[in-house]
Amino acid sequence: MRLFRIRGGVHPNERKDATKDKAIVNLPLSEKLFLPLQQHIGAPSRAIVEVGDVVKKGQLVAKAAGPISAAIHASTSGTIAAIGPHPVPHASGLMGRAVTLIPDGKDEWGETMPPLSDDADPKDIANRVADAGIVGLGGATFPSSVKLNLGERHDLDILLMNGAECEPFLTCDDRLMQEHTDELIQGIRLMARALGVKQTIIAIEKNKPKSAAAMEAATQDDAGIQVVQVPTRYPMGSEKHLVHTLTGRETPARALTADIGVVVHNIATSFAVYEAVKLGRPLVSRVLTISGGAVKEPKNVRTALGTPIKDLINFCGGLTEKPQEILSGGPMMGQPLRSTDIPTVKGMNGVLALTAKDTQRGQTHACIRCGTCVSVCPVGLMPLEVMRNIQNDQLDAAVDTGLMDCIACGSCSFACPSNIPLVQNMHYAKGHLTAQQRTQHRNEEAKRLAEDKIRRVEKEAAERKAMMEKKKAAAAAAKAAKEKAAAEAAAKEGGDA
Ligand code: SF4
Ligand code: SF4
């Protein structure tokens, strides 16, 4: 297959050796699990359990609260101990609402959903994925059922399974592809069926030859699935760049890859789809990589969703030194975790405890206008210009210079010889703009409600006035009729006399 070159990109040290040959191991259940109600892009789920409820593994604990939302299920059997604020993995560092579940130790499944056949109706597959609460497991956390329904509104021809796993340290997708090849392929076929596409491409970076060999062997008799090894170049795993590499198609700014005929799903999502459709099991666990220079025994673990990070780290032998930072996800795009009480969530593909040597964050110097950040930016921005606008508090100008097109890949910060935290500035500005937009939306909504109220009051007053006038007119008419009748009666009496 002809591959197209992506713009920019960098080659960070892969650091995958610590876990790439380590088989996935199951983490024992924690004493308490915490299930945040916001584990996906969209509206937070609505809890349907109460404190004191006894639940089975896989039982629905929170419903999707709208078309872009996702259901949440109990990760094990036990008792609901609380529903309220708890530390959650969010860039803001704020608490979020979570359901606290105390496991009973039996890990007993409740009633599972009936398995669907390979030739199930495409709509039934997408509905099952929604019922199972599956979201993109690569970190994007967009509800997968919504993406599986995109064929209704878009002219699609390719399902692209993203097995690039381009972030340093992370190897959980690599291990899944080697250890659960058949389940992944079954899940991928079901996803292609739901989308109604005939061509599927599984993209794997060249640094994972064992995964590529396993996936090729499992699909050699299937003309509809192609395994393609793509160059090891960060951020190859970015949806739009992967689509361009494999098809040469450019996704317009702020458009979806579906607009150019391609739907991209993370490879791990197909495992969750397999479990939901073929075993009737909702998403209650996931595989993630625990690594970084401060972790004693880095591992790939399968863990119940809601497990506190500290239990994952302890399972890996604990920390050898105080980490400089603990991240959810990879070092390029990962988010700092402010507490190890934070639980694992659906989109968390790794936990990294990084030392100062890992981060290699030197002192920040002034910009020397070398242009390196421009040459590595995969979306063609001038990061130094965007950042200058941000620092001058000119967010409109930052937007004009492409702030909203930034995919926060971190390539510019990584490559900058002056160690300028460019991507951190982008994050800050985007967060600020989002907060501004929220406030503006709230103000507009309040204004609209106030105007509606004034219009309603005026309308009611006008209606009352009209009614009074009508009553008055009716009373006057009645009075006149009465007077006329009295006059007629008097005239008649006079005539008779
Ligand atoms: S890479 Fe750093 S030093 Fe070079 S132009 Fe960009 S911001 Fe300035
Ligand atoms: S973080 Fe944004 S500005 Fe920096 S290289 Fe990536 S896309 Fe470009």
Image: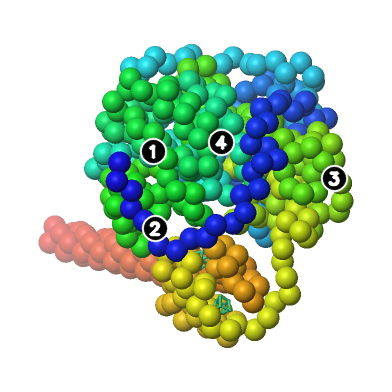
Name the residue beneath numbered marker 3: 319
Precedes in sequence: disc 2 or disc 4: 2
Secondary-structure class at tag 1: strand
As measured in the structure, the alpha-carbon distance from the residue carrying label 2 to the one carrying label 4 is: 23 Å
Question: Closer to the camera: disc 2 or disc 3?
Answer: 2
Q: Earlier in the sequence, mark 1 or mark 2?
A: 2
Q: Which mark is residue 228?
A: 1
Tag 4's secondary structure? helix
| Residue behind label 4 places its C-beta within 8 angstroms of ligand 2 | no
Mark 1 touching mark 3, by CB under 8 A? no
The kind of residue tagged 4 is Asp
Residue beneath label 4, please?
173
Query: Does residue 342 appear anywhere in the picture?
Result: yes
Q: Which residue is mark 2?
A: 6
Q: Quadrant of residue 309?
A: top right
Is 421 rendered above or below residue 299?
below
**1 vs 3, front mark:** 1
* Three-letter amino acid code of the residue under disc 1: Val
Amino acid carrying label 3: it is Leu
